[in-house]
Amino acid sequence: MTAYIVFQRDTTTDQQALDRYAERADSTFDGHDVQVLVDYGPHEVLEGPPIEGVVVVQFPDAAAAKDWYLGKEYQEVAQNRFQGATYRAVLVDGADAGA
């Protein structure tokens, strides 16, 4: 079942750290079956407090998503994201077709 990681950036604390993250994040997708569906496009918060942006990344299944997210390459790069902003990252399974 298709799975998604949804990243929500709440607040930026260090733009330089986020810039370092942005420079390297895409290279962590090499060798993974991944598609970026949303990448900080315009958004409108319908419920809850304001956020700065959203990224949605699609994987073939939850195991593939975790393989990328927990992998050494991404975790090294993610340190800059952790330093640069307050985020939420949620892994969610997609709906079955026809459900």
Image: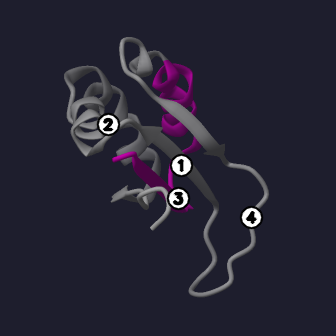
Residue 13 is covered by the magenta coloring: yes
Q: Which of the two discs, 4 and 3, labels the residue nearer the N terminus? A: 3
Q: Tell whether 68 sits left or right of 85.
A: left
The kind of residue on which mark 3 rests is Arg
Which residue is depicted at the point 56% across and 87% down?
Answer: 48
Identify the element where label 2 is drawn: helix
Report the span colored magenta. 1-26
The image shows residue 9 at horizontal and vertical percentages of: 53, 58
Identify the element where label 1 is drawn: strand
> Which residue is tagged 2?
79
Q: Which of the two discs, 2 and 3, labels the residue nearer the N terminus? A: 3
In three-dimensional space, the C-alpha distance between marks 1 and 4, rounded to whole angstroms, equals: 12 Å
In three-dimensional space, the C-alpha distance between marks 3 and 1, rounded to whole angstroms, equals: 12 Å
Q: Is residue 78 above or below residue 10?
A: above
Residue 62 is covered by the magenta coloring: no
| In this view, the mark in front (1 or 4) | 1
Identify the element where label 3 is drawn: strand
> Which residue is tagged 1?
56
The kind of residue on which mark 2 rests is Gln
Q: Which of the two discs, 3 and 1, labels the residue nearer the N terminus? A: 3
Which residue is depicted at the point 40% across and 20% down?
Answer: 28
> Which residue is tagged 3?
9
In three-dimensional space, the C-alpha distance between marks 2 and 3, rounded to whole angstroms, equals: 15 Å
